[in-house]
Amino acid sequence: MGRLVAALLIFTLTGSLTAQQSGQVDWEQRFKQLPDPQRMKDNMQRLSARPHHVGSPYDKENAEWILAQYKQWGWDAHIEEFQVLFPTPKLRLLEMIAPAKFTAKLEEPAESVDPTSKQKDEQLPTYNAYSPDGDVTAPLVYVNYGLVADYEELARNGVSVKGAIVIARYGESWRGIKPKLAAEHGAIGCIIYSDPADDGYTRQVPFPKGPMRPPEGAQRGSVLDAPLYPGDPLTPGIAATKDAKRLRWQDAPSIAKVPVLPISYADAQPLLAALEGPIAPPNWRGALPITYRLGPGPAKVHLQLAFNWDLKPVYDVIATMRGSGEPDLWVLRGNHHDAWVNGADDPVSGQVVLLEEARALGELAKQGWKPKRTIIYASWDGEEPMLLGSTEWVEQHADELRQHAAVYINSDANERGYLDVEGSHSLQSLMNGVAKDVEDPESKVSVFKRQQARVLLHGTPKQQAEARSGGNLAIGALGSGSDFSAFIDHVGIATINLGFAGEDPSGNYHSIYDDFYWYSHFSDYDFVYGRALAQAAGLTVLRMADADVMPYEFEGLSHTVAQYIEEVKALLESRRKEAEDIRQNLNEGVYAAANDPRNPTVAPPAREIPPYLNFAPLDNAAASLERAAAHYNKALASAQGKTLSPDRLLAINQQLAQAERKLTNAQGLPRRPWMQHLLYAPGWYTGYSAKTMPGVREAIEEGRYTEAEEQVLLVAHSLQDEAAWVDQISKELAGN
Ligand SMILES: [Zn+2]
């Protein structure tokens, strides 16, 4: 409903109604014809021809080539450079010293059919960036995915990781969470391996015959504490310019606390096979032909790591097309260009889409189109180590962005499948509209219809009911894991992240096999989903840049907030139920009665029973926001057919662009001041996946009930501000 009203308004709000109407539609139609799969394929081959990680020669060459492309298409483009801490390995040693001797290879072999897999001289070895240096020897403990619940399960089995080295499998969390939780539980080292159950032969045929990770493939990646703050670890909150004031790397709080190394399952299997102790619970068992056991020991391992702690340059390519009507409102769009190795999928499949959009917009400009607002395209560097290029750029330009930015639209790796959209819920109806206007290249229905079908077949009963009603499909909330983080989490700019995925398993993430050979055999090799993404992201840019009233909408936000409030209430109740059950079981001797003396388990400790919390301030704020959202849609409808002066429209749009900022708090979340959004944040113990209403939710999850109540007030206050702000805009729209 809201979306429909907004769409009508775009076409009717100005005096030159008919011209405007056909003009808008015409430019969108022309735009959609332009993205060219063959160019994407050629550009992918060029950009992924050699390894191009931060600080490598080809990373710089790519940045310069991208710059030349933007300029050739008529953009005002330049490179912005920052100096960031980027450690590379000097020494990597992992050996088992008991009960048998084994030395891990730590090497991904070249494949004869895959030409770029042979570029050994330029490849970064397998490692986790921002592991500290270390030399540790200790018994090994298997910790499954290394999540909070996994440590509870270990405790039930009477296994402690204190003084041990843990081995965790990849998956289910941001990888930096694994060493973080290991260290919090007293471990002195952390190994992360790729189990074939998660991205190997269990799922599909391994590379090079299929897309999945081969025995000796390993996943590189950052282990920075991203939920604390992303970006250069030495310059939190400020840009990493040449003469910025820097922390010593030993003092940087986002660097992992214990040495950590990623390995293949070929290297992991002998270590896991040598473990004894309790049998791992059923859902902890991977797909290796061994009996998974927990330890500790008798496997004893020696892990030794040393790094070059160097500053390296990152090269962000920034291209601007100045707006003709409201140039001080900015529409931003970005995707990174750096990779761990050749990175055809991550990130080049997204980068070539971004470039095709920029070429198409340049083409429209040559044909006479002028964007109303300023459009900024960004090819970020340094995403892989932890969003370095985008975060430093946002920190450098934070004041301007707070004033001018209307939206940031992000993408990263793109594959075949469904259009996944996450982001600010004030853009939910815009994105539903975009999805209805882009055709799925395989099924030929709209990508909206395809996503709706997916929800109808696989969604929860509640999602199915919503999809059946034909309303807007809900978009997800943003956690972390790509360049949107600084925009939404730090500055509070309305943000969207989008891309196609879900049909091809991609098992070679962050390995030497994520390259042109892999992508052109196993992913979107005819680049038709590349074209569809260029159309979807491009239409989003065009609508944000050209609509008379920028297409925000607040009913989607208001519904989502109401849902988050129900969730945190339910969370408190389930915590209470758990605590009461444990207490009762302890009192009645239930754990002791069920114990198997040959496989003994330890009863869980009694927990504090949560107090009742006052959620009324949140309920009241949600009610205000619901009323404000309804007013806004009414005001939009009543403005239809009226001629609003350019000054009035500008004032309305400037206020709309500020609406997301009302959902932030300058003090940030408890213990993480960099994270300023009160509705979305990467989870403290999940990383990639979002915690919504994080201050309230995490305080309840972690049993800090006084803090939960403080956070309720803070969030309620900001929601009341948001409601008042939206009411003000509605008056501006409807008034005379
Ligand atoms: Zn990426």
Image: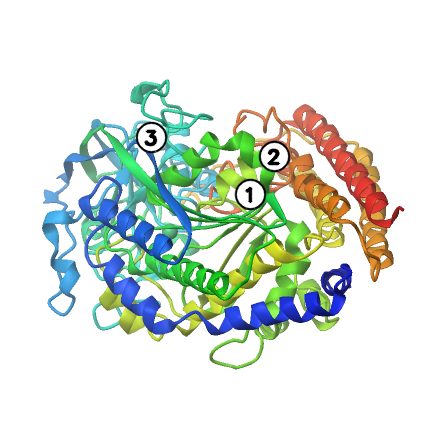
The CA span between labels 1 and 3 is 32 Å
* Label 3 sits on residue: 187
Residue drawn 37% across and 31% down? Answer: 232
Task: Report the number of discs.
Answer: 3
Q: Nearer the viewer, residue 413 or 78?
A: 78
Q: Secondary structure at mark 1?
A: helix
The CA span between labels 2 and 1 is 64 Å
Assess disc 2: are there few (<14), some (14-19) or many (≥20) residues with their C-alpha within 10 Å of its C-alpha: some
Q: Quadrant of residue 329?
A: top right
Q: Nearer the viewer, residue 154 or 423?
A: 423
Measuring from the top left, give residue 711's x and y in whole percent. Answer: 68, 29
Is residue 579 placed above or below 117 in the rendered structure? above
Tell whether circle 1 marks a residue whose Cβ is less than 8 angstroms from ligand 1: no
Q: Quadrant of residue 697?
A: top right
Residue 289 visible somewhere in the drawing: no
Measuring from the top left, give residue 362's x and y in whole percent. Answer: 45, 60
Residue drawn 68% across and 68% down? Answer: 464
Q: Earlier in the sequence, mark 2 or mark 3?
A: 3
Assess disc 1: are there few (<14), some (14-19) or many (≥20) residues with their C-alpha within 10 Å of its C-alpha: few
Q: Which mark is residue 593?
A: 1
Looking at the image, residue 16 sits to the left or right of residue 182; the answer is right
Q: Type of residue at label 2?
A: Gln
The reply to whether the C-beta atoms of the residues labelled 2 and 3 are less than 8 Å apart is no
Measuring from the top left, give residue 518's x and y in whole percent. Answer: 26, 67
Q: Type of residue at label 1?
A: Ala
Q: Type of residue at label 3?
A: Ala
* Label 2 sits on residue: 403
The CA span between labels 2 and 3 is 46 Å
